[in-house]
Image (cartoon, coloured by chain):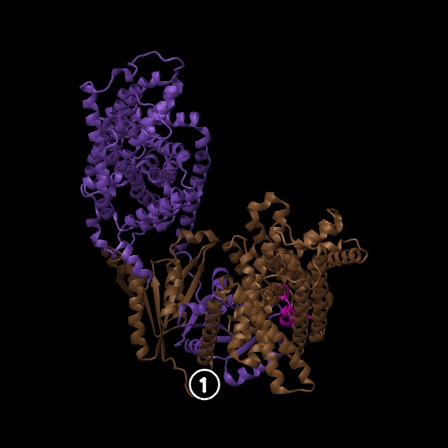
Chain colours: A brown, B purple
């Protein structure tokens, strides 16, 4: 049942050799990996305007120089990550760069921030997309959490089906969104050039603004930079590309940078020339679209694709999280389970954990995740800063041919990213302080896990110096609940292995019962020693474990191995199990985890 | 940790021999077993008035003849259950009586209805008590469900501590409630007799009422009879009494009947003479108390003890449910787990299941359980009717000395109970129809469970005619994940038992890996055959079970027994387990339930 549902949902299992077919070409990769970055165009410019609006509409011309700053940062990041892709062609992005060049802890800070960040990406973008839908259909408002969770489940299943399949589905809406914004920007700029827009709408560049300060400008810049989240995703996901993977990834990254630059500057320019003010109810993109087209088909097309891309931005998390997790798991900082490829060759544990974690977040915040956005931006700019710094160190150390311009690019990137990070802490401390608490906790957990794996490795390694104890003989203990076919079966099994001694143990609750049982036993199994234990407190486990302890203690002195042989009948149907006391299972679990005895379960399958 | 919390909550375990000290004397038994019946006085008379109120206050004098009818039914039930106690001194009440005299299915209908009914008792009375509390403190209204659940948990823990202890705690509020109502009735009657109450308040008995009908009177009678729920509890709980148990139980039953009769007639009389009309917001008892004392200490004393007894009525369910379950479990109609005595000698599984089931009900109905009351009344009157009919059959069949008056009593009881049942179906079908659906389902489940136990019994019984297969030899299969100390440990164990063959099985995911592994193995364990399985789909379980199937198939032809020896390392701390793939556990579970192979787990305890 479970397996057929699974097969319907995610499709037939794939052979390991089919891995090559699961790789992405550039067009599809651009769609799945850039949806997060491109979707930020829908709110990045607005964030700048919101900060400037505190000084009045006269300050709006500052969006232009700020946008230039964002474009410089974008260029630095794209060029820098392009260098990272070639330097670290197996993916891992900021984590690998920081770890290699700055040391383990900076690497873990970058990796930990990004892991959390991808969970936030999913929660925040799905919530934002759901918001867009419930704004359009207010009747759905009460089901916001449910709708958001359904989207997460949908994306999780889609990704479990494999990278190629999800890319084929998701490519359409992403390119439609890009197309819609291209038309909007094109028509808008045509209107401006042909004088269709009144020049009175905007204050000219350079108009003096009272109350302007460097701090405010930096704050606006930091807010605008939130449009750059998601830029790092491609560097984490290189292994998903068709060969030659690094080359294709680099080309895709540059393509994404160009698209992002065009869309971002287009929206900023239109907002400036149209003189648009941020409003609580209507987004800036929506205002621009309405001013350009009125409320016709194009307007709804733009609104619809925007809502879609907000949800699909979550998919970037699904592409990058599992691959980052693989890198961390390879280094033993997170459970090995993240290394396992699922039926469809994706790292399904990573995908499922990401889905569950974001559902928990959505549920905890009741799909009101707006105030998680600054946290999410900081979670990106910390690894940005660390990876750029790591690259700086790399160039300094290695000094390959033509390293100076490379160092220059990374230095610019590092300085701006660091400034943005600091601005977030200075201006939105109340929303981002928690990163200071949870990153150290995560890094600590990483180290504990690594320590455990290393301890286990040490103990599993065969060493010549310590020969294992030789077993001199075997004692078998058979707990018996009565004289039944099941017990007989187990006794026959034990006899067949001819250990040095077989002891049957019977736990009785009532004194009168004991003698009768012993007499009957003597007739039935005269050659097997029976030990009867009286249980004052009606527990089978306690007297039994005490007895086993005693036997084990004696046996270990003479290097004898104790085996507990548990007779267990297996009912024909699963639901029958609730009708039987699970003493066998309980004995097995308790003994296995606490004592040095071997547990043998002899099943007796019931036929009806 | 778990065990020390358990010990704090329910106390030290008791020896089986201490059972005698857990028996109840009459005073305590009366308190715990009659709380349900006595608490119904708080709403029974009101139910009659509500029906009569449809014809106006002039009809209220009919409460007197209706109350007489209820008293006759009460007398018949008390006398009849007294006879049941002596006839069936081991408890089981309606279930045992109906089963013995009418047949299995009537017995199961009675037993099933009562089981469900006790769950309803707990849910309904705790909700009603919580209502009384939140009416007094409206600030608590939003936490109704939580408060009700806390009460259920409290009662569950109290009952897990043992019958004696819960009786000692609960006796005070029950007797305080009786005392409070005695004072109320005494002072009220004194006022009436001394002319302190105006005779104009009530219409004289015999005043003609327009629109009166037999149907309406019967409906009022049926509603009033809901005060009689809980009368059967003592007959289920005889084993909880001190010796001589049946005698003590019978005396307690009569005592309860007398108390119930006095309180019920007292409240009805006062309500009639005071001319009280049912009101939505204020209960009849509250109106009487206010009319008698005004809003002074006595008023609040009566209100407070009433709220308490409503909650404690739930305890009757806790006393009767586990003992009824024991009777059903002895006959194998419900899981054997209900027969197990817990640490404190109570039937703790019954207590816990009752608690969980009522919490689910409270949660599902959000503590608004008023419309469950008719269902709950029907659930009592069905077993009432069945047990009275059963007793009639018994007297007819056995005809012991002086059987005629006994038959007469039971016939009266049966006829009235049957009438009440029918009235509930006729007048409140919308609320009680579900009993027609779930009782057959429950009875069906009872039969299925019984059938399963009988099948198992047949298969476990040793028969001389069918000698078990003798084992001719042993094959041991050791799944190995690598060459480690853990695997070495398991191989040494297997060698020590010297089976006919040991096969190590290695599942590989990558072809290149295989040869290297095989070569290394030959050097390490030259005398153990290694089989390498290639897994196309990266599953360890599938190729392994297929291989084991093949071996098992061959082995069974020549009566060889296959044992799968699973090397398992046991981490030092519980949380470490999430860091390791639980392949061992999965292999064990899958193989045990599906194949005829013995599973041996060889633990290797890690030291750090």
In percent of width and height, residue B284 lies at 31, 28
Q: Is residue B21 left or right of residue A24?
A: left
In this view of the protein, can residue A562 be seen by the observer? Answer: yes
Determine crowd level at label 1: few under 14, some 14-19, many 20+ residues with C-alpha closer than 10 A: few
Q: Which residue is mark 1?
A: A463
In this view of the protein, can residue A174 be seen by the observer? Answer: no
Which is more toward the observer, B458 or A180? A180
- Per the picture, the main secondary structure of the magenta-coloured stretch is helix
Chain ID for label 1? A
Q: Secondary structure at mark 1?
A: loop
Residue A476 forms part of the magenta stretch = no
The part of the image, by quadrant, that contains residue A315 is bottom right
In percent of width and height, residue A305 lies at 69, 54
Q: Residue at x 25, y 46 (%)?
A: B166
What's drawn in magenta, residue-wise? A226-241
In percent of width and height, residue B114 lies at 36, 38
Image height check: is B56 above or below B430?
Answer: above
Total numbered labels? 1
As drawn, the residue found furthest toward the top would be: B208
In percent of width and height, residue B430 lies at 46, 30
């Amino acid at each position: 049942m479970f397996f057929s549902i699974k097969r319907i949902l995610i499709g037939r299992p794939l052979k390991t050799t089919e891995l090559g077919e699961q790789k992405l070409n550039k067009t599809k990769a651009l769609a799945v990996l850039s949806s997060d970055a491109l979707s930020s165009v829908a709110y990045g410019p607005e964030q700048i305007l919101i900060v400037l609006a505190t000084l009045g509409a006269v300050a709006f011309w500052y969006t232009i120089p700020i946008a230039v700053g964002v474009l410089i940062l974008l260029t630095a990041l794209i060029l820098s990550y392009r260098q990272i892709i070639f330097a670290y062609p197996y993916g891992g992005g900021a984590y690998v760069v920081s770890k290699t060049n700055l040391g383990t802890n900076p690497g873990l800070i970058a990796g930990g921030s990004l892991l959390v960040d991808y969970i936030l990406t999913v929660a925040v973008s799905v919530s934002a997309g759901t918001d867009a839908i419930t704004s359009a259909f207010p009747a759905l408002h009460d089901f916001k959490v449910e709708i958001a969770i359904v989207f997460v489940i949908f994306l999780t299943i889609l990704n479990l089906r494999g990278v190629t399949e999800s890319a084929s589905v998701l490519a359409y809406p992403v390119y439609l969104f890009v197309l819609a914004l291209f038309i909007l920007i094109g028509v808008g700029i045509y209107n401006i050039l042909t004088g269709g827009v009144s020049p009175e709408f905007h204050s000219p560049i350079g108009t003096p603004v009272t109350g302007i300060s460097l701090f405010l400008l930096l704050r606006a810049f930091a807010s605008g930079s939130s449009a750059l989240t998601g830029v790092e995703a491609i560097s984490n996901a290189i292994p998903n590309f068709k060969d030659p993977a690094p080359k294709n990834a680099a080309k895709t990254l540059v393509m994404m940078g160009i698209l992002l630059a065009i869309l971002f500057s287009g929206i900023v320019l239109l907002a400036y020339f149209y003189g648009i003010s941020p409003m609580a109810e209507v987004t800036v993109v929506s205002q621009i679209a309405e001013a350009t087209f009125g409320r016709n088909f194009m307007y709804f097309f733009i609104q619809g694709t925007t809502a879609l891309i907000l949800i699909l931005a979550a998919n970037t998390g699904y592409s990058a999280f599992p691959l980052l997790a693989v890198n961390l798991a390879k280094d033993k900082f997170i459970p090995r389970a993240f290394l396992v490829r699922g039926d469809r060759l994706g790292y399904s544990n990573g995908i499922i954990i990401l889905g569950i974690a974001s559902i928990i977040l959505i549920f905890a915040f009741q799909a009101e995740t707006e105030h998680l956005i600054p946290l999410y931006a900081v979670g990106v700019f910390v690894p940005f800063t660390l990876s750029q710094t790591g690259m700086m160190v790399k160039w300094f150390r290695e000094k390959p041919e033509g390293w100076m311009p490379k160092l220059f690019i990374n230095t610019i990137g590092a300085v701006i990213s660091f400034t943005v990070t600091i601005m977030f802490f200075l201006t939105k401390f109340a929303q981002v302080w928690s990163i200071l608490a949870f990153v150290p906790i995560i890094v600590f957990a990483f180290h504990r896990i690594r320590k455990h794996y290393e301890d286990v490795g040490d103990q599993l390694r065969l060493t010549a110096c310590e020969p294992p104890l030789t077993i001199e003989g075997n004692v078998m203990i058979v707990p018996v609940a009565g004289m039944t076919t099941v017990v007989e079966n187990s006794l026959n099994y034990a006899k067949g292995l001819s250990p040095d001694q077989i002891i049957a143990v019977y736990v009785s609750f009532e004194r009168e019962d004991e003698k009768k049982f012993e007499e009957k036993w003597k007739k039935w199994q005269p050659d097997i020693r029976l030990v009867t234990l009286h249980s004052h407190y009606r527990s089978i486990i306690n007297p039994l474990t005490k007895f086993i302890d005693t036997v084990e203690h004696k046996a270990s002195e003479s290097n004898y191995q104790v085996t507990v042989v548990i007779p267990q009948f297996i009912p024909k149907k699963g639901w029958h199990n609730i009708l039987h006391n699970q003493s066998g299972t309980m004995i097995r679990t308790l003994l296995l985890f606490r004592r040095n005895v071997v547990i043998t379960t002899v099943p007796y399958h019931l036929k009806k």
